Image (cartoon, grey):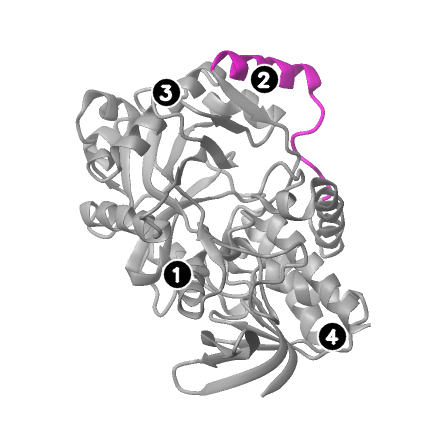
Amino acid sequence: MNKDVVIVGAGPAGIFTALEMIKKGSKQSILLVEKGQAIENRRCPKHLTQKCVSCKPYCHITTGFSGAGAFSDGKLSLSCEVGGDLPSLIGADVAQETIAYADSIYLEFGADQHVEGIGNTEAVKRIRKRAISAGLRLVDCPIRHMGTEKAQGIYLAIEHYLQEHGVEMLFGFECTNLLLDGAVCRGVSITNGKISYDVHAKRTVVATGRRGADWLEHICAEHGIAHEPGTVDIGVRVEVRNEVMEEVNEVLYESKLIGYPQPFKNKVRTFCQNPGGFVSQENYDNDLAVVNGHSYKELKSNNTNLAILCSHNFNVPFNQPIAYAQKVGELTNMLGAGHILVQRFGDILDGKRTWQKELSQSNIKPTLPDAVAGDITAAMPYRAMTNIINFIQAMDIVVPGFASIETLLYSPELKFYSNRVKMDANFCTSIEGLHCLGDSSGWTRGLMMASVMGVLMGRRIVEAEA
């Protein structure tokens, strides 16, 4: 099979590469290869089973057209200060300009016009003052909230647009290897388990998302593609009553707070805040269950959830940060018999596990009903757990009641984007004809920055075509 461009992974980075090529009038043939299914065929059965059934061969929440984006909270961060390190590669001005452009594309396909987290200047000042007194930094970031259910419709419209404009899509196929001729990439090998193809292409774009970060790390090591260990995030998802987060939810919608708590001074941050949201489970390869959060536009709970993530940077001789985070997750899963663990913050401070009876008597009712009450400290590394505890106590100054006895902590929350592929500002790797985008590349975190990287990649390809 011969194509001008083959894109591996139909997450935001891959989607926006193809989309921008079309919008710029490219005549090149494009093949989009996706391990999962078309968005209309992605279905999580949990609403029927009331518990995760570990779908095989992959989790429909994390895999398929639009990646985890279609089933996530669907929030677009509109500031280049949020979403990874891409601005350091391409420049902050270019990043911010492209965010505005990518945002206009989302609006074109049906995203909500309303932007959260703007205005309320005096209220923001009060929250910032409390953050400063707690030793935390509040990052201003307007948010366009598509919503979990609305995001699926937006990405469905984009999928149909791509198909109508000649983009060929192969669903249910995964990439097994790159086709290399010395230091030149000639395409990819793909299979659906029954049929295998070698796809020969002038340009190969790998955009496999967080789920594909581990695979890409192995590919880089196998073929000598220049890369380096990056940051790995290990943490928990915290859930409190909406009443506790009421001011922050109304003023900021999503509070992005960063701190460097004693004694280790590692970077700890909040991420993916979901007012009235639901804690969810996602399954990665090797039956690894991780926790996440969803936020719908219409359906609301009595709780707010958010992630607290501790960043770990490793040096020689260790160079497997993704494997490290996976081991933490596996140990936590073992304690929860394959399920997500949940523990009350007060029980952590008291050095005891949480029992199901105690959860049933609390003001906070877990929105992940099949989470198992237990002891997350038995699996969480001491350094990470200490950082998280101290950060939560600092958060209590910003949001009084956040560090209450009944506050729930779910584990494991892991972010797999630690492999950093070395590239120039045109996203060219050390292998000619190979480009790596999105969260799997180690340069972005989240929907918007991955979309931005795709837009810029699409432009680069079209410019080279002219």
Residue depicted at x 33% and y 31%? 408
Could you tell me residue 143's position as x and y percent?
64, 38
Q: Decide: marks 4, 3 in contact (CB < 8 A)?
A: no
Residue type for callout 2:
Arg
Q: Residues within 10 Å of mark 2 (few under 14, many from 20)?
A: some
Residue holding disc 1: 45
Marks 1, 3: nearer the viewer: 3
Distance of mark 4 from mark 3, alpha carbons? 54 Å
Whole-percent x and y of residue 156?
A: 62, 63
| 241 is higher (above) or lower (below) than 10 | above
Q: Which residue is mark 2?
A: 128
**SS for callout 1:** loop
Find disc 4 in the rendering and name its residue: 165
* Residue 303 seen in render: no
| Cα–Cα span, label 3 and label 2 | 20 Å
In percent of width and height, residue 128 lies at 58, 17
Q: Reply yes or no: does residue 118 show up in magenta.
A: yes
- The CA span between labels 1 and 3 is 43 Å
Q: Is residue 44 above or below residue 387?
A: below
For the point 51% across and 85% down, which residue is it? 198
Query: Closer to the camera: disc 3 or disc 2?
Result: 3
